[in-house]
Image: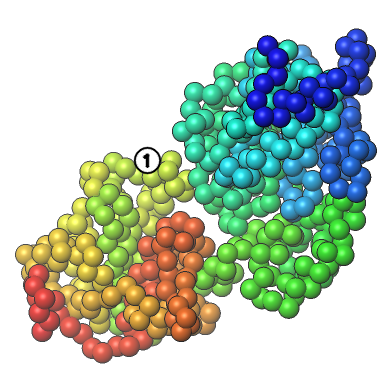
Amino acid sequence: MGKRGPGAGRLRAAAAKVVPQDAAKPWEQDGMPQAEQVLAFLRTLPIVSGLMAGETMELLDFQEQFVRGIYGDVDDLGKRRVRLAALSVARGNGKSAILAGLSLAHLLGPMQEPYGECYAAALDREQASVLFRMCRAYIEAVPWMAARVNIKDWHKEIIDEESQSIWRALTSDARKAHGLAPSFWIADEVAQWRSRELWDNLATGMGKRASALGVTISTQAADDLHFFSEMLDAEPNPTTYVQLHSAPDDCALDDRAAWMAANPALGAFLNEEQFADAAARAMRSPSFAPSFRLLNLNQRIAAEGRFIEQADWDANGEPFDPIELEGQACYGGLDLSSTRDLCAFSLWFPDHGKLLTWHWVPHDTIGERVERDRVPYDRWADDGFMERTVGRATDRVAIARRLADVRQAYDVKGISFDRWRFEDLGKLLSDEGIDLPMVEFVPGFKSYAPAVDAFERAVLAGRMQHNGNPLMRWQAGNVIVETDPAGNRKPTKSKSLDRIDGIVTAIMACGLADRDEGPQTYKGSGPMWV
C-alpha cells in the first residue's frame, strides 16, 4: 500500500532520492559492538534546523558517554544489561535530538526488532508533539528512512513497513499505556510529572520483551521524594544507568564552572551569551533565581516559589522529647478531611518554639495510598508519625480520643478548626463529654493572612522545632501560597504539589496563638459558644 495521509507527499519526495538498497550503512559492519552501532547511526542523522541545518550530527562528549553507558555494558552472550537509563542535565542541552535519534535507532536502525513497539511519553500532547516532529524531520531528511515508513500525523504515529514496528507518542494519561509491550520507550522531562503511573505502566510492560529499554532525559525534580530523584539517588544497579550533570548546591549564579557542570553543551550549541543574560537576571530577581537554579543549573530546588525553603524547615529539626512539653501552654489546629483521606492535628507551643503533629489514615487503604501518592505512608506509620485507624475510613472516634488525651496532657489554650466536616466529630465530642476550647477558622484570606505571617516568622526564627517529622518535611516542600491584590497570603491545596494537611494545621495553630483572645469551650454540637 502506498503512503497515505497528511505529509505523504513529503515522504514520497524524500523517498525518491533514496540510495540503492544494497548500499552498506555505517553500522552494518560485522562484529561491531552495540554502542558503536548506535553511535554510527546517530552520526548519520542530519541537523534539521538552525545555523548548521543540513550538516550531520556531531555528538558531544557527554552525549557519547550516555550512549556508551547504555549500550556498552553487555553480558557473556553479548546481551545489553541496561534496561533503564536516565540522563539529568539542564535545559537546552540537546535533549530532544538524542531522544528522537535513539527512538529511530530502535524503530528502523541498528536496534530494530520485528514488530517492535516504541513509545515517547510526555507530560502533555504539546511536549509529545515536539519529539514526534523531531523524528518526522529526521525521516523526511533521510531518503532511505522515508522510503520505508508511513507517518500518521493525527495519531502521532510512525510505522516502519519493513519490520512492522511502530513509534507512537503518549501523554500522561496512563490508562493508554495499560497492555502495551514496549521494546523501547522514552520519557521526556519526567521531573515535571506529578504521577509516576505512566512510567510504571511502561516499565512493567517491558517484561513482555527479551531486551526492552526505557530512557529518560530530564532536569532534576524539585524534591527528594519525586520518583526521578529516587532513581538518581538509588544504589548502583547493573540494569540501570544514571548520568547526572548538575551545578554544586552552593555555587554562585555567575560561576561559569558551575554553568559548565550542568550545561556540557554550553558554547557548542547552547548560546553562552544568552545564558549569561539569564544568570544576570536571576541575580537581580530573587523570584526568578529558584527557577534558574532548577532549570538552568539543574539543582534540586523548587522553582514554583514555594512557601517554605527546605533549608529553613530543616533548620528547625533539632530533636526533643515530647514529654518535656506536658502541662505547657499550647495552641492547636485541626484539619478534617473526608473519611477516606488524611486528617491532621497540630499543637504549637509558642513559649518553647516546638510543634507536635498527628496524622490519621485508614488502615485498609494505606497500601493504596503508598502506590497512589508514591510516599512511604506505611513506613511513617510504623515509625509512629501517623496513626492507623481501623477499616477503610478514618475513624472519628480515634481522633476524639487523641484530642481527649491532648486536653489532659497539655494546657490547651485553643484549637482552631474548619467547620467543614466537623459536624460528626463535634457531636462525638459532645456525646462523650469532651470539653475543648474550639475556635472556628474560616479558610479565606482574612483568616489565613495573619496566620501565615505568624507561621513564617516562627519558621525563620527557628521556633518551629518539629522533631524531624518526615511527613511534615515532605508537606513543607509541597506548600504553595496564593496572594490576593492586597498582599494577603493563604496556602492553596489545589496548586500545591501534593498534600499539605499537617502544615495547614500548624499555620492555623500559629494564627490562633498570635491573636490569643482566651479560651472558648465547646459544650455541644450547636452554634453557641460559652
Viewer-proximal residue among 414 and 85: 85
Residue 374 locus on image (x, y percent): 47, 45
Viewer-proximal residue among 456 and 117: 117
Q: Reply above or below: 33 against 486.
A: above
Give the quadrant of the N terminus. top right
User: Which picture quadrant has residue 453?
Assistant: bottom left
Residue 276 locus on image (x, y percent): 83, 67
Mark 1 element type: helix
Q: Reply above or below: 203 against 211.
A: below
| Mark 1, residue position | 368
The answer to whether residue 80 is visible is: no
Residue 159 locus on image (x, y percent): 67, 21
Q: Residue at x 41, y 62 (%)?
A: 493
User: Which picture quadrant has residue 355?
Assistant: bottom left
Q: Can you name the residue that lies furthest to the front here?
A: 9
Q: Reply above or below: 464 against 515.
A: above
Label 1 Cα crowd, 10 Å radius (few <14 / some 14-19 / many 20+): few
User: How many marks are shown on the rendered structure?
Assistant: 1
Q: Amino acid at mark 1?
A: Glu
The answer to whether residue 170 is visible is: yes
Q: Residue at x 53, y 41 (%)?
A: 172
- Is the image coloured rainbow, by chain, by secondary structure, or in one colour? rainbow
Q: Residue at x 20, y 73 (%)?
A: 408
Viewer-proximal residue among 323 and 167: 167
Give the quadrant of the C terminus. bottom left
Q: Residue at x 25, y 82 (%)?
A: 413
